[in-house]
Amino acid sequence: MKGRSLFVILLTTAALAGCARLAPPETDALAKLLQPVPSKAVIFVLRNEPASAPWRMKVLLDGKDMGSTSANTYFRWVVEPGRHLVVSDTENDTGVVVDAQAGQIYYIWQDVSTGFFRPRADLRFVDRQTAEVALRSCYLLQGDA
């Protein structure tokens, strides 16, 4: 049992090492307050699936590479109001359009599944309560919009 726990810790650490850098704990704690930003919109992309740890997934915002997620990580971007495209660059390249309004927060869940050559993903909007619960076990990635 002890050996298995160590293996899981090492596997998660290795997966996180290849991602965008983790934000400082203070920044992570502030992001988890889920506060809106006046005259801006906030987009969260969260991945709360421990079993998907070995797979990194690149995420793009409006065509810009923002970094890669791994298990139990998330991005928080403050953006200008307007239309934004969030894409998960995987075997099936999936995306969602966010029609962002000032003062609003948008939560996007990144589902992961096995693909033929690379993992597959699905992006979908979730409500605040779902995001709030999932974020409890996630870590903020650095990746400013």
Image: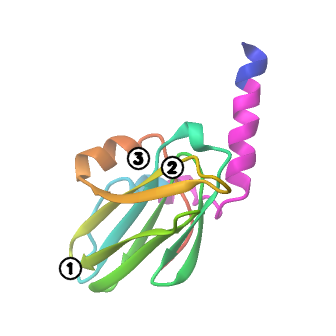
Secondary element under disc 1, as helix, strand or loop, is loop
Q: Quadrant of the N terminus?
A: top right
Q: Residue at x 65, y 51 (%)?
A: 55
- Residue 41 inside the magenta-drawn segment: no
Residue bearing mark 1: 101
Front-lying residue, 26 or 28? 28
- Residue 30: x %, y % from top left: 40, 57
SS assignment for the magenta stretch, majority: helix
Say how the picture is coloured: rainbow
Residue bearing mark 2: 112
Residue 47: numbered disc: none
Figure quadrant of residue 96:
bottom left
Q: Amino acid at mark 2?
A: Val
Give the Cα distance between marks 2 and 3: 16 Å
- Residue 21 inside the magenta-drawn segment: yes
Residue 135: numbered disc: 3
Camera-nearest label, 2 or 3: 2
Q: Residue at x 28, y 65 (%)?
A: 106
Q: Which residues are magenta?
A: 6-27
Question: Quick check: 130 left or right of 121?
Answer: left
